[in-house]
Every structure is written in structure tokens, then in C-alpha cells.
Image (spheres, rainbow, N blue to C red):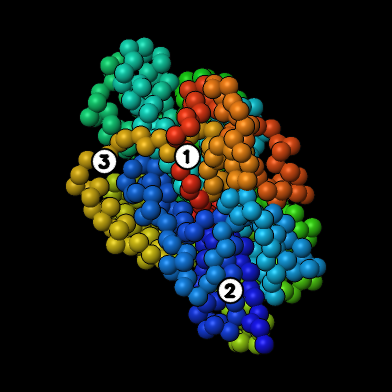
Amino acid sequence: MSRPRIVIVGAGFAGYRTARTLSRLARGRAEIVLLNPTDYFLYLPLLPQVAAGILEPRRVTVSLSGTLPHVKLVLGESDRIDLDARRVHYTGPEGEGGTLDYDRLVLAAGSVNKLLPIPGVAEHAHGFRGLPEALYLRDHVTRQMELAAATDDPERCAARCTFVVVGAGYTGTEVAAHGQLFTDAQVARRPMRTGARPRWLLLDIADRVLPELDERLSRTADTVLRERGVDVRMGTSVKEATHDGVLLTDGEFVGTRTLVWCVGVRPDPLAESLGLPMERGRLLVDPHLQVPGRPEVFACGDAAAVPDLEKPGSYTPMTAQHAWRQGKVCAHNIAASFGDGERRAYRHKDMGFVVDLGGVKAAANPLGVNLSGAAAGAVTRGYHLAAMPGNRVRVAADWLLDAVLPRQAVQLGLVRSWSVPLDTASPEVARVPGGPGRGQPPGDGTHPPEAARTGPEPARNRPGGEPAEKRPAVAPPPDQPPPGPDVAPGPVKRTDRPSEGDS
């Protein structure tokens, strides 16, 4: 008798936890298949430290095959799911197609950048959802500081060392906090000829920083940012973005070459393409994480609208904590569907949140106890070390080295601007010239060819399965020429970081 097959789509917090728990529960009695574009789980909460040069990229990645020895890893992105035939169609990293039949399906595809209809944002802003974007931002910030230090033009220098972050949630706050320290350290070693200083702006339409947190923690973060020199502007956002800067909603034009988009996330379009009942782009499930009418289909993480049993009538927010816990419950309920154990309804207890503000500064409320300063910093780093499923010693070693040695600020040139467009359903994968399964079309040597700018995307990248070829191309900014024939962007990937509640 053949073993039943369980297919898990996505290896983010929810998918990875589901696979790890199932491999322990199944004990070889079921075939567990994990479909993911790359071969690692990404610990997204530490991504701002990668962008700031504190952690090396591999420190926040955990090998899937190395930590899930009883799980079959299939590299690829899901294009389409045939629910009636119980089959997943996918495209591999080199453009090859494939299918996976299943007895149980777990949709844990995560989320993508949340876009707003603001002129110029899609063309000139970059998100912060994966390693490609973090590596690009680190190179870009370093390059802008070097160019600013080399010019005698005060206006050009000011624009290059001005950095605008939109979104004062967890991600945006941490990016601005770490970014200010990163650029200040560079200026300390190499002062600007014009005497200018790095300027970081943090914008949000909310009335306070970190609106998801307790007001006391919000005030702590706001105070740390302002004392560090971050220009915090609440009730303000971007009205229009151009190559030369951004027009704010209060009418001010800010000259800048850097716009980081951290306004939140939206569920992966794959969930909407199934044609099942949805709740704001998330697949509706019952408290046991099963899709009504499709008992063989489970969903968890950002892709699922899970009823919040602690707050009847609402759904659990898109956070890393919920995704991680839902993955465990999902695994137990899948095992129960095969007669092993009892089903569990997803319930949660808030364990608190942590926000790393760089250096020894942080804001945290573990178990409801509000902390700030060095104590919060110690709790925050301890929490991350405990939560990471691997690489703990390497991360701790990088933190120690950062505390005693000057930070390295060099451009690696692995990820270019055009390879990490904001408007994409796959922020975990950097675009490459030609893309998988497609040859390199001729270019004119000035702009990258069409495939190099966007690369092909599976049909699942648009709700309803609209082919990627119909989408407008994202052209590179003038200061970002395409790579030469011997320069290729690094192949890097992200998993689903569940929203602005990452802890």
C-alpha cells in the first residue's frame, strides 16, 4: 500500500513549522513534499540587520534539506492548483514544469508587498520582504554614501544621503533605526566634503510609531529614533515619487535617491486564484485550519483567514507568531485526518512583541511586561536566538564581532535595482537576465531587455492567473545600468514574513 502524500506549498514560518512537525508525527508513514522556490527558510525578523551589515545573509537562512531530513524538497513556484484533480502545477527554477499529486494540501504561500495607487512608487520604490531586497538596500545605501562623499555639490550630496522609509510598523521602524546607525558609522570614517549628515525620514499616516504596540512601547521607540536623528513624521506619507525625490502629502518635496516601501503586505495571489471563499485576499478556513467543503485542503499563515477564538468575529492578524503556531496546529490536524490523534482548534495567547532598534536599544513587552533600553535589547536578542530553528551560534558570533569591530561597508554588486521590482508576486526571487526557460533577448546596451527587467512570472502571480507577460515592465532607474554579460544578480529567496507583526 502506497503512502499518502502531503504537499506543502511555501516554506515560510507556517510552511516550515508544518513540515517539521509533520515529519516527526508521520515517522515515515506519509510522504511529505515541500514546494518552495529556494532551498532555505528565511528568518525575516533579522533582515534589517542584514541590510545594515550586522549579519551576513546566510546567518538568517536555514537549510531546508539540512533541517528537514524526512521531507522531500521540490524547488519551484506553484502556478496553479487543480482542486478537483488534487494536483499542484509548478515551475522549477530553470523554467521546467512539473506536477505534484496530493492526498492532503497545505497552502502556506505567505504574502507579498502591499501596493498603493501612488504615482511613481512602483517604479522608484523598493520593498523589504526578502534577501534580494535587503542585499540591494545594503549596496544601494553604501553606494549613495560613497557618491555623496565624493561630490562637491551640496544639493546632490544632500539628496544622496537622504533616505525615506514609508511605514512605521515593525519593519519600517527597524530599517530606519538600523539604517541611521549604519550611515552615521560611514560618515564618522569618511566625512562629507559639504559637511552634510545622513538623514533618515520615517513616514506613516498613523498617529504614532508602531501603532500595533502598547503606547508606552511606541513612545520608547519614537524617543530612540528621534534622539538618534531620524526625522519621524506621523500623519504624513508620499503623494508622488520621482527619480529625484518624493513629494509628501504635506506639500514638501524631499530630494532623495532612496525610497523604502514598508507599508505592509497582502496575501499571496495564489490563494485568490483558487476561486474559494476569501476574506480580504486570505483563504477562509475553520478554526481547525481546514477549507470548508474541501477537507483535504488546509491553509495557515498569511494566506489564511483564521478565526480568532479569543476575539469572536475577527481573524488572527498576519504575524510571524501566528504563522509559526498555526503551522504546528496544522500538522497535528493533518495527522488527525489520517486517524493519528485528535483535531485541535487554533487558539493563541499573546506572548508579547520585541522591536530591535539597533545597538543596545530595543522595545519589548514579553508576557506583558514593558521593557526598554539595554534590558529590552537583551530580551530581544535572546528571543530571536531561541526562535531561530538554526544558525544560533553564527548569529551570536556576528553580534559579538559587530560589538568589537568596525562594520564593513562595501558594495558586492550582486543585486541590481531592476532585479528587485516592488510590483512582484515573488519578492523572494531576484530577477535574472532572460529568466528561467527564456533566452537573453538582444538589448541596446543602455537598458536591460524586457526579460531581464522583469523575468517571466508564473500565471499564479496575478489573481485569476493573468500571465506575467501582460504586466507593465519596471525599467531601471538611470543610475542603475544593467549588468554586463559577466555580472549576474545573485539567486536569493525569501519565505513568507507574516506582515507587520513580525516579532
Find numbered disc 2 in the image and state the secondary structure of the residue it sits on. Answer: strand
Question: Going from the N terminus, do you reach mark 2 or mark 3 first?
Answer: 2
Q: Relative to 269, is 290 above or below?
A: below
Q: Amino acid type of disc 2?
A: Ile
- N-term-proximal mark, 1 vs 3: 3
Residue 246 in sight here: no
Q: Which mark is residue 407?
A: 3
On screen, residue 212 above or below 120: below
Residue drawn at x 60%, y 87% is 341
Q: Earlier in the sequence, mark 2 or mark 1?
A: 2
The answer to whether 38 appears left or right of 185 in the picture is: right
Q: Residue at x 53, y 43 (%)?
A: 430
Whether residues under marks 2 and 3 lie with C-beta atoms below 8 angstroms apart, the answer is no
Residue 181 percent across, percent down from the top left: 32, 38
**Up-down relation of residue 64 to residue 409 (above or below):** below
Q: Give the quadrant of the N terminus.
A: bottom right
Instruction: Write the residue at 48% across / 46% down.
Output: 491
- Distance between the alpha carbons at the discs numbered 2 and 1: 32 Å
Q: Give percent across and percent down for residue 134.
A: 44, 43
* In the image: residue 205, left or right of residue 146: right
Structural distance between the alpha carbons of marks 1 and 3: 24 Å
What residue is disc 1 on?
489
Task: Give the residue at x 25% y 23%.
Answer: 191
Residue bearing the label numbered 2:
32
Classed neighbour count for the residue bearing mark 3: other residues with Cα under 10 Å, few (<14), some (14–19), many (≥20): some
Amino acid type at image mark 3 = Arg
Residue 165 shown left or right of residue 296 in the figure: left
Q: Helix or strand or loop: what does disc 1 sit on? A: loop
Q: Amino acid at mark 1?
A: Pro
List the single residue furthest toward the top.
153
The C terminus sits in image quarter: bottom left
